[in-house]
Each structure stands twice: as structure tokens, then as C-alpha cells.
Image: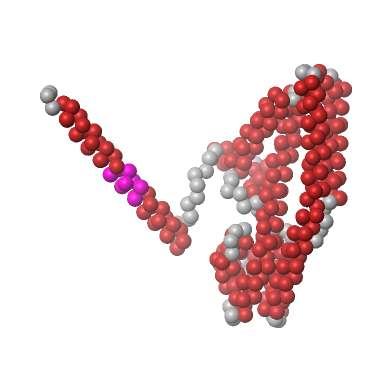
Amino acid sequence: MDNLPLLTIGITLLTCVLAVIGVHVYSSGKAQREALVQRMSHTGQIPAVGRRRRFGGIDRRLRKTGIGRRIERKIAVTGLDLTPGEYFVYVVAGLLGLYFIIGAIFATFFGVLAALAGIWGGNAFLNWQRTKRTEAFINQLPELTRVLANATQAGLAMRTALVMASEELDNPAGEELRRVADQLAVGHTLDDALGELADRLPSRELVVLVTTLVLSSRAGGQVVTSLRNLTETLEERKETRREVKTVLSQIQVTALAVPMIGLGFLLLINNMTPGALDKMTGATMGQVGTIVAFALYAVGYLAIRRMSRIQV
């Protein structure tokens, strides 16, 4: 018992050494497993492993419904790493957050309106993500046509040129072209694979490119010359779109600022006279007037966005 402190120190040091060894063995084993999975996924022996999915039960039930299938199709064209179940849970959580936050700041009736607007906002978010992905893909089209022109000029077939472009380009073009290459590998025709690409990312630039590639594959002709000319045209359109977007940015900010000013006035009134919004929305006429006012703000916002939308 006289050597008890020394024995305690020795056991503690031994435990620390074993802990360090255990952490080192675990980290090295995990790294080796990830390297093995990545190597085998590239060879196609096992599917690629992604992140762990949440809300699996909700996702399975939601996929069996019509709304779940629609959500799945919308998410598929946005490039988001989400399942329908995760998206549904996040939207519901956001609606509850809007209801409580807006209801606490303004009034309970405004919380209900915010939750209803959030339902539209969830769908608008997916549409915005699709538009954003389409815009990013359009910006990569000049580079894509340049790669295809160089590959075909080197004597490669169009299928091989598409595979090469999918490996060289960044996302979203690389990911979309890999999907096209996978479809071609399992027997889809070039027309069908490129047609599905144009359906996923609708734009006039992509339709022109797809039409050029399809006609060249059917009737032959000078593919390299067509792609070179298309590259120059797409570069010019890219610059024009950037200039138009810069000119219209002030109008878009105005469209968003107008309803924000209205909400600011409501918040100012409620701070000057506490409970004024509760009294206003407590009567039927007040609720109807609030709904009409917000509807007019929405119409004004959409009208300004519509008038400032220029197709290039």
C-alpha cells in the first residue's frame, strides 16, 4: 500500500498510452476503409457511399405519395443533396419557425400568413435552385463546346467526347454530362440522353447545342466548325446576359424593397402603439384588409419582376 500513488500514476500512464494507440488504430483503419470504398466505387463493384440520410421512415412513406414523387422530381433537377423526407421535415420546421417568430414580432394572424407564404416559398426555393443550376450550366456552355470541338477535331466520337467533357468540367456541367454518359453506356441513344438533359435544364442555349449535336450525329457534316461558331456565339450571349443582369439589378432590389418597407411600417406602428396589430387583426375587417394589402404587395412585386424580365 506504500506504493499506491506510484501504482496509480503507472496505471494512468498505461491507460493514456493505450488510448493513444487505440485512436491511432481507429483513424488508420477508418482511412483505409474510406480509401477501399472509394477505389471500389470507382471500379463499379460497390455503389458510391454518401452521407447518412436522416428521417428514413418519413422519406419512405412520403415517396409512396403523389406529392412525395413530385418533390423527388423537383429535387432531382436542382442538384441538392436532399431526400424528399429531409426536405419535407425542413420545410415543416421552417413553417413552424415562421409562425412563432412572425407571430411574436407582429401578431398571431401575421404568423399564420407567414406560414402560408412559407408553403409557397418552399416550392419557390426549389424553382430558384433549378434556375440557379441552369444559369451555372449555361455559363459553362462555351467551355463545354470548346472541349467537344477539340475532342471531335482529334478524331474522337461524340460519345467519347461527352465522356471526356464530363471528366474535365466542374459541376454542374460535369455531373450532368456524367449522367448523360451513364445513359449512353446502358444503351440509350444520343438523342434521348441529350433530350433528357435539355428537359432537366431548360434553356435556349442548351437547346441549340443539343440540336446541333443531334443533327450532326444524324446527318454528319462539319461538327468542329459548327461547335467553333457556337462557342463564339455562346461567349457573346454570356457577356450580354451579364450586362443585362447588371442593368436590371436595381429594379430587382426595388421589387423586394417595396414590400419590406410595408412590413417596416407595420413594425413601427406596433412599437409606437403596443398591441395595435393584435387589435387590428382581431376583427374580421382588419383581417380582410391585411390579406388584401399583402395581396397587392405581392401583385406589385410580381409585376415589377415581370416587367424587368428580359429574355436574352
**Quadrant of res 147:** bottom right
Check if residue 242 falls in the magenta segment.
no
Check if residue 27 falls in the magenta segment.
yes
The percent coordinates of residue 229 (x first, y second) are 73, 75
**Quadrant of res 284:** top right
The percent coordinates of residue 103 (x first, y second) are 71, 25
Closest to the observer, 254 or 86: 254
Q: How many numbered marks, from 0 up? A: 0
Q: Which residues are magenta?
A: 21-28
Q: Is residue 172 left or right of residue 102?
A: left
* Residue at the spot 59% in from the left edge and 72% down from the top edge: 161
**Quadrant of res 144:** bottom right
Question: Can residue 278 be seen in this snapshot?
Answer: no
Closest to the observer, 188 or 18: 18
Q: Does 139 appear above or below 16?
A: below
Q: Does 275 appear above or below 309?
A: above
Q: Is residue 62 left or right of residue 212?
A: left
Closest to the observer, 229 or 113: 229
